[in-house]
Image (spheres, grey):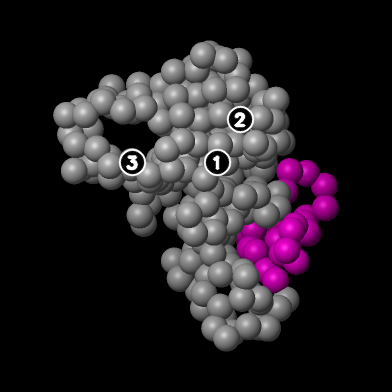
Amino acid sequence: AQSVTQLGSHVSVSEGALVLLRCNYSSSVPPYLFWYVQYPNQGLQLLLKYTTGATLVKGINGFEAEFKKSETSFHLTKPSAHMSDAAEYFCAVRIGFGNEKLTFGTGTRLTIIP
Amino acid sequence: ETGVTQTPRHLVMGMTNKKSLKCEQHLGHNAMYWYKQSAKKPLELMFVYNFKEQTENNSVPSRFSPECPNSSHLFLHLHTLQPEDSALYLCASSRDLGGRGEQFFGPGTRLTVL
């Protein structure tokens, strides 16, 4: 069975500092990996996704993530945090083509300190 | 209207009430989903529909009854709910099942069961 672990339910960074949100997955087959963001009172919005090909994936709002198979990780980073990045972030995994199930992590709430 | 819309945005109901949640997608997608988002828990997939046919029922109690009259509309009929059913209910759609496509989410309905 697939699963997703997000380390740290709350992360605080100063404005302008590096953002690092951690995600590890378990899967016996190559996964498709996603990061979603949820702003208050809104649904989830896709930040970026990895399916195949280049392991460093760039998304919206300056975020990027790197798929590391050896570490079963897909950590989300942004070089310089902005106040508007404050939100909840969810990592998700889908196993294999033709499988519609997305398994989500429990989320990480990102707080930006002015 | 664009994207995925959900009504109502907020709903308070007693345990004996019957209510319905509505989801509409304007993206021309063929697959639609209901998720439950509770505090401190991962998103839970409840139901999946593809071309109006239910393809997934993730062991959801019968007090939740989905309906998909066409590929653009999805309903969740609620009756005799329990307080632990209070949560944010998210609707999502995707072009088709599986593959590499992303799911697009609505803003959710915040349900409170008294």
What percent of the width, then of the height, locates residue B71?
60, 19
Distance Cα–Cα, label 2 vs label 1: 8 Å
Above or below, B98 relative to A24: above
| Alpha carbon distance from label 2 to label 3 | 20 Å
Corner quadrant of residue B113: top left
Q: Name the mark on residue B73.
A: none
Instruction: State the residue at coordinates (63%, 83%).
Output: A15
Badge 1, how many Cα within 10 Å: few under 14, some, many 20+? many
Quadrant into which the N terminus of chain B falls: top right
Circle 2 Cα neighbour tier, 10 Å, few/some/many (<14 / 14–19 / ≥20): many
Identify which residue is drawn at 52% across, 52% down.
A42
Q: Identify the chain of the residue marked 1, using the numbered disc in the image.
A: B
User: What chain letter is assigned to the residue under label 2?
Assistant: B
Residue type, mark 3 in image = Leu
Of callouts 2 and 1, which one flags the residue occurring earlier in the amino acid sequence? 2
Q: On the image, numbered disc 1 is attached to which residue?
A: B106
- Residue B76 spot, x, y in % from top left: 40, 26
Please say whether residue A60 is one of the residues in the magenta stretch: yes
Q: Badges 2 and 1: C-beta atoms under 8 Å apart?
A: yes
Find disc 3 in the rendering and name its residue: B11
Callout count: 3
Q: Which residues are magenta?
A: A50-78
Residue tagged 2 = B25
Element class at badge 3: strand
Kind of residue at badge 2: Gln
Could one spot residue A101 in this view of the protein? Answer: no
Q: Nearer the viewer, residue A71 or B96?
A: B96
The amino acid marked with disc number 1 is: Gly
